[in-house]
Image (spheres, rainbow, N blue to C red):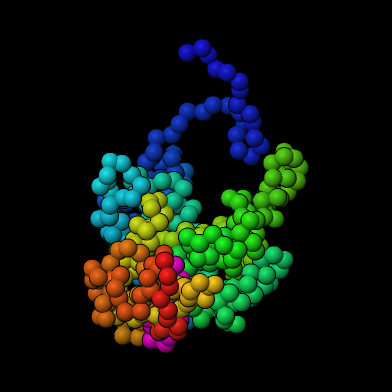
Amino acid sequence: MNGPAGALVAVFGYNDGTIRPGTAYGTVASGIRRSTSAEFTSEDAYVLVDGAGTPRFPIRAGTDAASVANPLTEAEVRAVLEEAFAVLGRSRAQIRRPLDSRMQASISMVDTHGAILGVVRSPDGPIFGTDVSLQKARTAAFFSNRVAAPQMQAAGGAVAGYVQRVRSFLGDANALTGTFAFADRSGGNLSRPYFPDGEVGDVAGPLSVERPGQFSPFMTGLQTDLILPNLVEHLGFVISGGASADTPRGCTQLPDAPGGGKRIGNGIQIFPGSVPIYRGDELVGGIGVSGDGIDQDDMVSFLGLHNAGQRVGGSAMRGSISVPTASSSVSMAATCACAMSIAPSRRFSMIRARTSARGCDASGRLRPDGNRARGAGRIAARNASCRTRPGGGCRARRTARGRQ
């Protein structure tokens, strides 16, 4: 009413200080448009595109033949994404009004090298979910990978120190070498500045800062240590107006995967909403979901993979581990792993960080009393991981019931 006050400030590399008109969402110019029937089966799906309208991340097979005996096929990737999107479309949102609104989110899938195998989103999924769902998928695949510890140690500096912290914390000298499968709920629990949740003490999770008092939104532990040098480089680039070199794409301190590229190309995520994918006892990828409440995101990633397995037959196993604390043994992993048989000799298994949704029975079918499944600890929010075994699924390593 009284005219503009002040002025926009130009930020090198971001904005020249001028006001520009907006771009209509869903148009090619916006970078997101409705998918065609050839790209994705659901009419309600949207994909990311370039300026010519070509999908940036079309569904494709795994690129990690150098590391995996039988990488994911394009058909398998499509099956998992379709089933996950179907669950998303039937789910009630946790964070939207009016109540009982439909869930909106993005779904990403990667192979063991962190390469993107497909990204799909619902019409009103938050834009940030594109990046975060990819972080979640890559995080689950990375921490479940046998090369996680070697790659972190090769990064050196603060990043390398987290390997021994995790091993000491879990009492497992082989942690982060593929022995355990980690969902993003797993890594998130280990990234808490106070462990376990709900107890304000002097113990931090091994992926968090060393002491709880050091935690801040800008210093969370491994999550920030992985990208801190890159952040400094980028700030130098912006402040210098381009005189200093910018940080390269794929901004983490980890070594490249075979063929180039980072397994964690856009940082890790410490919110639930992802699970690793196995063929038998071999890791083949990960799926991540972001855009709604973390329990809804978790449910879609788990049930999408589970239901894809049910289309071709599957099975279920359970297991858990525990971490001793000053007051009790905390059940870290009350998990339900469901296997997906692509052919008699091919099988996916998934490690579920159990949410308040439904569980699996002994045959792999969903059941409403999953929260009372055998081996389930009382502390559902502290679920972490379970040991994989040949033939798929997981077996119990240590079980304990924690105290809330």
Q: Residue at coordinates 51% horizontally, 28% vertically from top-left?
A: 20
Q: Taking 368 as reference, is 217 left or right?
A: right
In the displayed image of the protein, which residue is found farthest to the bottom?
A: 390
Instruction: Tell me if residue 249 is in the magenta stretch.
Output: no
Quadrant of the rendered structure where residue 97 is?
top left
Q: Which residue is nearer to you in this view: 20 or 99?
A: 99
Instruction: Tell me if residue 383 is in the magenta stretch.
Output: yes
Quadrant of the rendered structure where residue 57 is?
bottom left
Q: Residue at coordinates 60% horizontally, 51% vertically from top-left?
A: 216
For the C terminus, the quadrant is bottom left
366 up-or-down from 28: above or below: below
- Tally of numbered tags: 0
In the displayed image of the protein, which residue is found farthest to the top?
A: 2
Q: Which residue is nearer to you in this view: 231 or 56?
A: 231
* Residue 42 visible, this orientation: no
114 up-or-down from 238: above or below: below
* Residue 128 visible, this orientation: yes
Q: Taking 155 as reference, is 105 left or right?
A: left
116 up-or-down from 10: above or below: below
Q: Residue at coordinates 57% horizontally, 81% vertically from top-left?
A: 172
Q: Taking 78 as reference, is 192 left or right?
A: right
* Coordinates of residue 91 in the picture (x, y in percent): 27, 55
157 up-or-down from 55: above or below: below
* Coordinates of residue 256 in the picture (x, y in percent): 62, 67
* Coordinates of residue 225 in the picture (x, y in percent): 65, 59
Q: Residue at coordinates 73% horizontally, 45% vertically from top-left?
A: 236
Q: Give the range drawn in magenta.
A: 382-393
* Coordinates of residue 274 in the picture (x, y in percent): 42, 64
